[in-house]
Structures are given as structure tokens and as C-alpha cells.
Amino acid sequence: MSARLIIMGPQGSGKGTQAARLAERLGVPAISTGDIFRANVKGGTELGNQAKAIMDAGDLVPDSLTNAMVRDRLAEADTAEGFILDGYPRNAAQVEALDAVLAERGVTLDAVVELSADRDELLARLARRAVVEGRADDTEEAISRRLAIYAEQTAPLTDAYAERGLLVAVDGIGDVDDVTERLMAALASRVG
Ligand code: AMP
């Protein structure tokens, strides 16, 4: 079984949850750039110190730092059979950087999943998450900044992946288990 996937969707679309579930089902690691950055902030690393203020404001960490981090992560042995990238790539320059890393490794993507949810549902979920998780970037200002960046820079990337025949759109609204089954069904012909 091999599965090299990207999962896209705005913050609050449930993509982190679904990435973890798909990873378990497919036997490949879920790689969340947001989680890696947060672990670095918590651990007080150089990378974390550079990223913290940017993350708290809801802005994107510079591509140079992000791309280098993903390159290192994809060099780890557990990605031999695949990976699910969650939160990366987020802009056109990151798409190019990822293409280069995959080409160097001699592998290609199997699919890019776009998980959709409408804006009211997203805002309601993010507000709930802010209470439960207490994330520093779940303030109203940072949330709207993140959604704006998603709409401006990240959502348009689906066009490029659609042109390559990689895009799979899945409705992210509904019961968590149902969404996982929808994803597995949509990916069935592409992984393995
Ligand atoms: P997330 O958990 O995916 O919402 O990411 C949290 C924050 O980490 C983002 O708002 C950014 O500040 C930073 N981050 C995560 N992934 C990326 C990325 N691919 N490029 C730049 N910044 C990122």
C-alpha cells in the first residue's frame, strides 16, 4: 500500500482530524506543519522562536523555514510508503518546493483531497475549538486572518492540482465517521 496525499481545506474544516484517521487507515504518517511548528514553539527551539509571533498573528511562516522543515520531514524513513500532508502546501511557492522534493525522491502524489465546509460552519467550529484547545491563534482576529489567507493563497492551489488530475473534492460537513468513509471511498481508486 502506498499513499502520497495532501489534504486541503480551511481551518475548521476538520482536516486535522480526518488526516489522522486516514493516516491510521492507510498506514502512513499524517504530517501537520502546524503541529510541527507548535511543537517547536513549545520546545523553545530556534525555529519555534522564529515562528511564534507570526503564528500568533495568523500569518504564514516564511516559505524558506517551512519548506526546509517539510523537506527534512519527508526524508524520514516512515514516509517510505507515503504520507498525508496537512497544512502544506499553502501557497504557490510551496507547491513548487514540494514538487522539487518529491521529484528528488522519485515519487509522485496520488491525490489532493479538498475538504469543504461553509463559512458559518467553519466559524462555529473554530469558536468551539478555541474554548476546548486554547490555541494562541484562535483569537477572532487571527482566525479571520487565517481564513483570509486560505481564501487568497491556498484555495486557488486546487486549480493547479485539478489540472494535474489529482483533485478529489469531499464534503466535510456531517458526522466525523461519515466524512472518513466518504474520504476512503473517494480515494479507493487512487491509493494502494
Ligand atoms: P495550522 O495548524 O495548519 O492551522 O497552522 C497553524 C499556523 O502554523 C499557521 O497559521 C501558520 O502560522 C503556521 N503554518 C502551518 N503550516 C504552514 C505553512 N505550510 N506555511 C506557512 N505557515 C504555516
Image: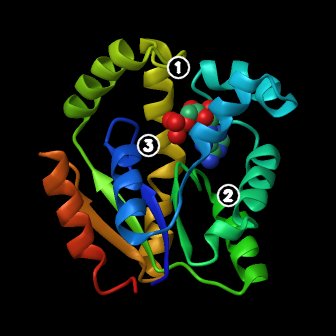
- On residue 147, the disc is none
- Looking at marks 2 and 3 on the same chain, the residue that comes earlier in the sequence is marked by 2
Instruction: Judge: label 2 CB < 8 Å from ligand 1.
Output: yes
- Marks 3 and 1: CB-CB under 8 Å? no
**Residue at horizontal 63 percent and vertical 58 percent from the top:** 92
Residue annotated with mark 2: 94
The vertical placement of 44 against 158, above or below, is above
> Which element type, helix, strand or loop, lies under badge 1?
loop
SS class, disc 3: helix
The residue drawn where x is 57% and y is 25% is 58
Q: Position of residue 6 (x, y in %)?
A: 48, 64
Task: Report the amino acid beneath label 2.
Answer: Gln
Horizontal side of 30 relative to 172 (left or right) equals right
Q: Is residue 69 left or right of residue 29?
A: right
What residue sits 75% from the left and 71% below the top? 101
Give the mark nearer the N terminus: 2 vs 1. 2
| Numbered circle sitting on residue 137 | 1
Inter-mark Cα distance, 3 to 1? 18 Å
Residue neighbourhood size for the residue with mark 1, other residues' Cα within 10 Å, grouped as few (<14), some (14–19), many (≥20): many
Q: Type of residue at label 1?
A: Asp
Are there few (<14), some (14-19), or many (20+) residues within 10 Å of tag 3? few
The residue mark sitting in front, 2 or 1, is: 1
For label 1, being within 8 Å of ligand 1 is answered yes
- The chosen color scheme is rainbow
Whether ligand 1 has any atom under 8 Å from the Cβ at mark 3 is answered as no
Q: Which mark is residue 151?
A: 3
